[in-house]
Image (spheres, grey):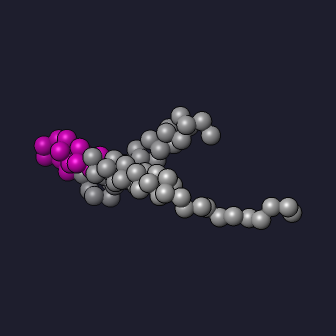
Amino acid sequence: MGHAYKGVQWTPFKKRFDLTLVAGIVAFLAAYIFAALSAAPIGESYSPPQILFRALGALAFSLLTLILCIEP
């Protein structure tokens, strides 16, 4: 083989991109959980695992949509 394998190069752009992505994920989860807790009907309460599973499912769908919009 003529080329040597190189791992991920941690450039300043890559670090900023990753930090921005993690901040967006945390903000999405926090907003979803806050909205789920505040929009619950009176007399009903959701269990924490139920809210977390729904939040992670919505996050997974949103990230998949974002990836497909970027055009792989």
**Residue at 31% of width from left, 50% of height from top?**
27
What segment is highlighted magenta in the picture? 32-45
Question: Among all residues in the image, which is located at the extreme right?
Answer: 1
- The quadrant of the picture occupied by the C terminus is top right
- The outermost residue toward the front is 12
Q: Is residue 48 left or right of residue 21?
A: left
Is residue 36 on the magenta stretch?
yes
Residue 7 is situated, as x and y percent measured from the top left of the image, at 65, 64
Q: Quadrant of the N terminus?
A: bottom right
At 40% from the left and 44% from the top, the residue drawn is: 58
Q: Would residue 57 be visible to someone looking at this image?
A: no
Place of residue 48 in the rendered image (x, y in percent of width and height, measured from the top left) = 28, 58
Of residues 20 and 43, the one drawn nearer to the viewer in this rendering:
20
Residue at 47%, 44% in the rendered image: 63
Is 7 left, or right, of 50 in this rendering? Answer: right
Q: Quick check: 7 above or below 64?
A: below
Camera-side residue of 6 and 70:
6
Residue 21: x and y, percent?
Answer: 43, 51
Q: Tell me where residue 71 appears, x and y as whole percent.
A: 60, 36
> Can residue 44 be seen here?
yes
- Magenta stretch contains residue 55: no
Residue at image x 77%, y 65%? Answer: 4
- 65 displayed left or right of 34: right
Farthest-out residue, left: 42
24 left or right, relative to 44: right
